[in-house]
Amino acid sequence: MQKAYEGQWVMDGIQFVTDEKGRRLAVQLDLKKHRELWEDIEDVLVSRSRRAEKRIPLEKVKAALVKSGKLTR
């Protein structure tokens, strides 16, 4: 549920840590209420951290799995 607090919207289970000027520095999530949101955020962070990694074509991965017996044709 959202509600107004000091001119800003507040959501249950989400708290912002602010500096002395009211600027948001961090957020705290209640994982019981927002586990799916956290999983989405985590997925984005992992994806961004892997941007520079070498990519392997899907066909190459499939061929290696077939060769190792972990995938059938």
Image (cartoon, rainbow, N blue to C red):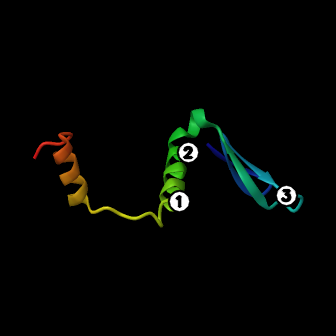
User: Depth check: 26 or 11 in front?
Assistant: 26
Q: Earlier in the sequence, mark 2 or mark 3?
A: 3
For image coordinates 87% across by 62% down, the residue present is: 21
Q: Amino acid at mark 2?
A: Trp
| Quadrant assignment, res 68 | top left
For image coordinates 51% across by 54% down, the residue present is: 46
For image coordinates 20% across by 59% down, the residue present is: 59
* Residue that sits furthest to the bottom in the current view: 52
Residue 48 vertical position relative to residue 2 in the rendered view, above or below: below
Q: How far from the left and from the top, in percent, is residue 5?
A: 77, 51
Do the residues under discs 2 and 1 have CB atoms within 8 angstroms?
no
The answer to whether 36 appears left or right of 13 in the picture is: left
Image mark for residue 49? 1
Q: Which residue is mark 3?
A: 19
Image mark for residue 15? none
* Residue that sits furthest to the right in the current view: 20
Q: Which residue is mark 2?
A: 38
Q: Amino acid at mark 1?
A: Ser
Around disc 1, counting alpha carbons within 10 Å, would you say few (fewer than 14), some (14 to 19), or many (20 or more)? few
Q: How far from the left and from the top, in percent, is residue 39?
A: 51, 45
Instruction: Name the secondary structure under disc 2.
Output: helix
Around disc 3, counting alpha carbons within 10 Å, would you say few (fewer than 14), some (14 to 19), or many (20 or more)? few
Q: Nearer the viewer, mark 2 or mark 1?
A: 1
Q: CA distance from mark 2 to mark 3?
A: 23 Å
Q: CA distance from mark 2 to mark 1?
A: 16 Å
Q: Earlier in the sequence, mark 3 or mark 1?
A: 3
Q: Nearer the viewer, mark 3 or mark 1?
A: 1
Q: CA distance from mark 3 to mark 1?
A: 28 Å
Residue 50 vertical position relative to residue 69 in the rendered view, above or below: below
Q: How far from the left and from the top, in percent, is residue 54?
A: 40, 65
Q: Amino acid at mark 3?
A: Asp
Q: How many marks?
A: 3
